[in-house]
Image (spheres, coloured by chain):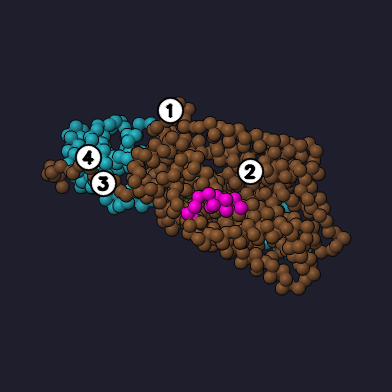
């Protein structure tokens, strides 16, 4: 919960200030992130479009590379935002209220970046609309038995749901900001707030609509990453063809998403000056959630290894051996240290309530989680059944650049967001404060009953 | 456009009491405007239950039927025979059905919200900017000056810190 000493008016002031007062550091960061996006994402992608998909290091047998690893990573990172927000809304968790808006924004932009990674991966993005079922002169319709079509439907639904969820929850705040801004900002907030006033009917409808959306979005979020896992698990590739994959991906997604929220919360708290709204309590609770998710993630990793070993099939042994001790073995152990061992520090409350260590740990976890996604594609396809079909995969410079550029794109989108959307939910933070009491006593009854 | 009595309160409890008093005095549907959702207001004003759930349900139902029809219809119209497996494959098609159920449920919920809360509305509504910060307004439409005066008296006696006369629709 927010610091209990602040007033309603101060919350409005703080949030409006975060939108209209922009320091030099913001512009510098925005300029750098735009530069990184163009230099590392747009430029290399353009080069790949001109040169062909051969610019990437992907080749037979490893036809999936860092583009798909980045895709899984960004979809995963998107998971905690909307999902966590919806779950905590349904369970009436007060501490959610100061942080959920930014977490939902993280979801939205992560899904957008993930969708861009698919565009990059397919090589000829101008044909991507072929995945959409629409009558066409080619009489070509998608094959709905393919997990890739599951993906298209799931990600479209998730992106639509996330946009609506964050927008609907922000309408009252747009109205509050509308009354305090002028010029183009005022016109923008007039449109975005839809003429919201805050009447009892509007609040009632918002409550029900938001609750129904939350109910719909929780299973949706679980389905999205399960479906992403089936892109891999429904193939017959050793080390991928496992029933554990759906929960493995969902847990990994919530894990890395929660770590992402910690990173974003730290940045917002420090640089948007929300110290009294985002408190140690938020970091403590997020830390506990991270700890639980890290233990679950570790357990599922052990089960995955055990399943491979227990299968007693030579191809599974080979794939496992390659992952643990092959060319990318050091990365595997780095992942274990970053995602299974380092998070054990979260057992200490002192650690959970220390801001800088939490920031460092959240970044470390997400480095580990990116490694996990990379290893999924880079250590399975090179070791399929027949040794003469084995191969090696090393990402090319273009792929590495685009991976770095995707972070630039995410940062750019998020920086634009914090200047348009109130990054703290005004009305919900106000709800966590003590209810205002009447200053003046009602006058004597004038005979009205 | 009608004339409205509007009382500004500094606490939700007094605003709710004032709304109840207006209702008790025979005023039709007083409106409470607030910076936060007020708990217990629906009991005092006796609002109807939301119809949004019907939108959500029928939207989701439509989505489910549309999703399965899309997948099954495509499979039947463009047969892609695979090793003796059924043309209409239930498990994968259920995933498409599920996703479209959720998608249409979400879109229908938004429609329900928009229609139910009478948005968008950009002009001629009773509103004062203080209610977006820390004030709670109770407002009621009055047909004549006598009713207006009566409403203002009730608001005053309920502890309003400021009474205003505003034009606009409720």
* Residue designated by label 2: A407
Indicate the quadrant where residue A61 lies: bottom right
Q: Between tags 4 and 3, which lies in front?
A: 3
Which residue lies at the image location 54% right of the left edge and 34% below the top edge?
Answer: A25
Other residues around mark 1 within 10 Å, as few (<14) / some (14–19) / many (≥20): few
Q: CA distance from mark 3 to mark 1?
A: 32 Å
4 and 3 marks in contact (CB < 8 Å): no
* Residue designated by label 1: A182
Magenta region includes residue B154 = no
* Residue designated by label 4: B160
- Same chain check for tags 4 and 2: no
Q: CA distance from mark 4 to mark 3?
A: 13 Å
What's the magenta region?
Answer: A352-364
Q: Mark on residue A437?
A: 3
Q: Nearer the viewer, residue A234 or A381?
A: A381
Q: Colour of chain B?
A: cyan
SS category of the residue bearing label 1: loop
Residue at mark 4: chain: B
Majority SS type along the magenta span: helix
Which residue lies at the image location 59% right of the left edge and 41% below the top edge?
Answer: A411
Percent x, y of residue A232: 70, 58
Q: Is residue A398 visible?
A: yes
């Amino acid at each position: 919960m927010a610091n209990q000493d602040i007033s309603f008016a101060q919350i409005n002031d703080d949030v409006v200030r975060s939108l209209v007062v922009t320091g030099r550091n913001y512009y510098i960061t925005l300029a750098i992130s735009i530069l990184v996006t163009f230099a590392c994402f747009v430029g290399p992608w353009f080069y790949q479009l001109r040169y062909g998909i051969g610019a990437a290091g992907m080749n037979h047998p490893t036809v999936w590379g860092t583009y798909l690893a980045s895709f899984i990573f960004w979809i995963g990172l998107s998971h905690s935002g909307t999902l966590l927000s919806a779950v905590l809304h349904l369970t009436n968790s007060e501490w959610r209220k100061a942080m959920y808006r930014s977490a939902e924004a993280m979801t939205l932009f992560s899904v957008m970046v993930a969708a861009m990674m698919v565009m990059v991966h397919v090589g000829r993005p101008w044909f991507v609309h072929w995945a959409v079922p629409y009558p066409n002169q080619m009489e070509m319709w998608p094959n709905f038995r393919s997990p890739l079509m599951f993906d298209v439907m799931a990600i479209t639904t998730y992106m639509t749901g996330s946009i609506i969820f964050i927008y609907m929850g922000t309408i009252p705040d747009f109205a509050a900001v509308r009354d305090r801004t002028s010029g183009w900002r005022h016109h923008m907030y007039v449109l975005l707030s839809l003429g919201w006033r805050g009447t009892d009917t509007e609040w009632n409808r918002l409550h029900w609509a938001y609750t129904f959306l939350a109910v719909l979005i929780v299973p949706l979020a679980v389905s999205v990453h399960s479906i992403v896992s089936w892109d891999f698990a429904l193939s017959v590739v050793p080390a991928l063809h496992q029933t554990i994959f759906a929960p493995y991906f969902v847990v990994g997604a919530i894990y890395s998403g929660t770590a992402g929220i910690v990173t974003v919360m730290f940045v917002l708290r420090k640089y948007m000056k929300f110290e009294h709204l985002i408190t140690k309590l938020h970091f403590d609770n997020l830390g506990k959630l991270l700890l639980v998710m890290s233990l679950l993630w570790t357990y599922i990793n052990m089960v995955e290894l055990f399943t491979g070993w227990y299968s007693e099939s030579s191809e599974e042994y080979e794939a496992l051996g390659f992952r643990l001790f092959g060319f990318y073995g050091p990365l595997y152990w780095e992942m274990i240290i970053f995602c299974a061992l380092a998070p054990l520090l979260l057992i200490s409350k002192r650690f959970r309530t220390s801001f800088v260590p939490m920031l460092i740990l959240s970044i470390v976890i997400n480095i580990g989680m990116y490694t996990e996604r990379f290893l999924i594609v880079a250590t399975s396809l090179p070791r399929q059944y027949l040794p003469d079909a084995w191969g090696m995969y090393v990402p090319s410079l273009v792929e590495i650049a685009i991976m770095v550029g995707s972070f630039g794109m995410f940062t750019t989108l998020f920086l634009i967001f914090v200047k348009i959307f109130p990054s703290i939910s005004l009305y919900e933070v106000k709800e966590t404060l003590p209810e205002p009491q009447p200053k003046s006593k009602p006058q004597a009854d004038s005979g009205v009953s | 456009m009608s004339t409205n009595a509007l009382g500004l309160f500094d606490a939700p409890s007094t605003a709710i009491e004032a709304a109840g008093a207006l209702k008790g005095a025979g005023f039709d549907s007083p409106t409470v405007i607030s910076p936060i959702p007020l708990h217990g207001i629906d009991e005092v004003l006796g609002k109807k239950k939301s119809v949004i759930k019907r939108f959500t349900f029928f939207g989701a139902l439509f989505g489910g039927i549309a999703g399965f029809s899309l997948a099954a219809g495509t499979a039947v119209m463009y047969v892609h025979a695979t090793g003796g497996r059924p043309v209409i494959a239930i498990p994968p098609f259920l995933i498409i059905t599920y996703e479209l159920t959720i998608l249409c449920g979400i879109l229908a919920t938004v429609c329900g919200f928009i229609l139910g809360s009478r948005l968008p509305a950009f002009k001629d509504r009773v509103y004062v900017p203080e209610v977006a910060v820390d004030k709670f307004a109770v407002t009621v439409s009055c047909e004549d000056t006598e009713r207006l005066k009566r409403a203002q008296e009730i608001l005053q006696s309920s502890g309003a810190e400021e009474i205003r006369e505003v034009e606009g629709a409720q």
